[in-house]
Image (cartoon, rainbow, N blue to C red):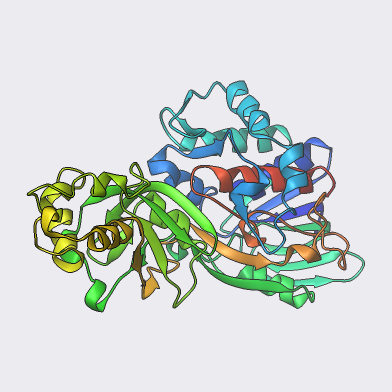
Amino acid sequence: MEKFDVIVLGGGAAGLMCACIAGRRGRRVALLEHNARVGLKIAISGGGRCNFTNLQAAPENFLSAHPRFCASALARYTPNDFIGLVEKHRIPYHEKKWGQLFCDFSSRQIIEMLLAECAIAEVDVRCGCRVKSVEKGERFSLGTNCGEMECDALVIATGGLSFAKLGASDFGYRIAEQFGLKICATWPGLVPLTLGGDEDLAELSGVSLPVVARTNGASFEEAMLITHRGLSGPAILQISSYWREAEKITLDLLPDHPKDDWLLAQRSSKWTAQTLLERMWPARFAAAWCARHAPPKALAQLSHNELSELAHRVHHWIISPNDTEGYPKAEVTVGGVDTSELSSRTMEARRVPGLYFIGEVVDVTGWLGGYNFQWAWASGHAAGEVA
């Protein structure tokens, strides 16, 4: 029976951070990863360059049943703290837009940095190690394919259900339920949406345009991409985390022209709506959209009410997605271990001393653009400081 002070289950962003922080405190730490390598999700993130944080990260950028839960951890480990670690390891990086920071070269540099920190902290990193059972007496007892292990503190950093091809599973949720913790309903987040029936736009696949997407009180202004199955692009991925089945999404197709004046000013024009909108949208999109939603007459032949109605449709195009592309295409899992069960300062389960939950397995989901990594670093750091 191997004995450790801390065992961290999951070698992703949160688990690696937690392990090296706990190890720095002189704890004997084991990090168990069931894949052959750690950091598989880090490796593919940001197109292979890892959007490792966002300078603007704040509680307002996260979705949770208890929105202020993440505030404590985020305040105590900030984007600047992680940037300091990146600079310590001399990893070149750059800012793209809206505070998004990426490696100049490869996301592998972030993985190597975290492994180097684990090595300095003498963390025992074991890959290909699968946990078969977890029990708790005076200590936690784990049955694994690497043998029996014991620890005082057990940290669950096993992630959510997104990217099953990288080994994602419901293991963390099952451990939480085993110890009587509540789970908030989960669904795919930051995921493309699918359309069907009369709303199918497959013939426009590849067309992109700026929009404002709205649902359930959330609003995102970014690019929308039409795919052969539905809608994607940053605006759609963002709003997907807030969308639920059978609900509608409203799209403003001309966010740079927020009022109706732009169309009313053309009321004497011989142009049709399509002719006008082709100057503002990709021509293929303008033709298809106007065939469905705009009268074919010249604008000069339209009444004031008809012009107002057309402008309203442009700024309030309502779509009804029939589904998402699911966990295989989702970047994150929304929902997870109910934060009311955890200490916001330490991530420890209130009713199970020594049991911690960090990262994506917790009901804290960030926006697109480095926010979820910052939650991983912050929650991992919070647990690592005390476990």
Q: Is residue 54 above or below residue 132?
A: above
Q: Residue at x 61, y 37 (%)?
A: 114
Front one among 104 and 32: 104
Left or right? Give the position of 363 relative to 257: right
Q: Quadrant of the N terminus?
A: bottom right
- Identify which residue is drawn at 29% across, 58% down: 308
Q: Is residue 209 above or below residue 343?
A: above
Q: Nearer the viewer, residue 304 or 47?
A: 304
Which residue is painted at 57% across and 45% down in the image?
A: 371
Q: Position of residue 237 (x, y in %)?
A: 42, 56
* Count of numbered labels shown in the rendering: 0
Residue 345 visible in the displayed image: yes
Q: Quadrant of residue 318?
A: bottom left
Against 175, is 100 above or below? above
Tell me which residue sits at (18%, 55%) in the image: 285
Residue furthest toward the right? 138
> Is 326 on the left or on the right of 176, as rendered?
left
Q: Is residue 278 left or right of residue 387?
A: left
Residue 25: % across, % down: 83, 37
Q: Nearer the viewer, residue 115 or 224?
A: 224
**Image position, residue 267 (x, y; %):** 18, 50
Residue 284 seen from this side: no
The percent position of residue 162, horizontal first and vertical second, equals 49, 63
